[in-house]
Image (cartoon, rainbow, N blue to C red):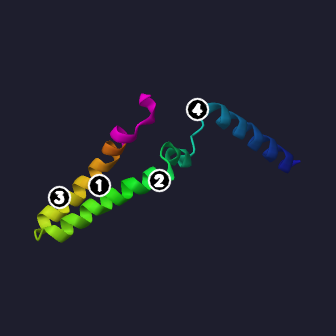
Amino acid sequence: MHQREVKQRRQRRRAAVGRLQPSLPRRRRVAKLWTRRSRAQRATIYLLALAAVVLTFLLTDSWGIRLAVAALVVIATPALATLALDRSRG
């Protein structure tokens, strides 16, 4: 008899907690973010960014310039890709 009371109390507590917790909207899957660009577009973006960094490393001797260009590529590539390949403009 004691176990039944404990079980009922647990069920009431779970129901009360469920009513108190705010419901969150369903989260989109992260994989959908990649569908904005085709595989060829993503490959082109990566290769151009890599080419810029490699050329900088080959053509300059200064580590400051190398690191600055690498950081600039990392920061600017998403913005430039969005500007150049945004599909919502048409």
Q: Nearer the viewer, residue 13 or 68?
A: 68
Categorize mark 4 by other alpha carbons within 10 Å: few (<14), some (14-19), many (20+): few
**Magenta run includes residue 55:** no
Categorize mark 2 by other alpha carbons within 10 Å: few (<14), some (14-19), many (20+): few
Q: Which residues are magenta?
A: 82-90
What residue sits right under mark 4 in the picture? 22
Q: Residue, x 20% and y 68% (percent of image)?
A: 57
Which numbered disc, 1 or 2, marks the residue that appears first in the sequence? 2
Q: Nearer the viewer, residue 23 or 17?
A: 23
Residue at disc 4, secondary structure: loop
The x and y percentages for residue 8 are 81, 41
Pointer 3 with pointer 2, Cβ within 8 A: no
The x and y percentages for residue 53 are 25, 63
Q: CA distance from mark 3 to mark 1?
A: 10 Å
Residue at disc 2, secondary structure: helix
Farthest-out residue, right: 1
The quadrant in which residue 71 appears is bottom left
Q: Residue, x 32% and y 43% (percent of image)?
A: 79
Which numbered disc, 3 or 1, marks the residue that appears first in the sequence? 3
Pointer 1 with pointer 2, Cβ within 8 A: no
What residue sits right under mark 3 in the picture? 68
The quadrant in which residue 20 appears is top right
What residue sits right under mark 1 in the picture? 74
Looking at the rendered structure, the kind of residue marked 4 is Pro
Q: Tell me the number on the disc at residue 40.
A: 2
The x and y percentages for residue 1 are 89, 47
Which numbered disc, 3 or 2, marks the residue that appears first in the sequence? 2
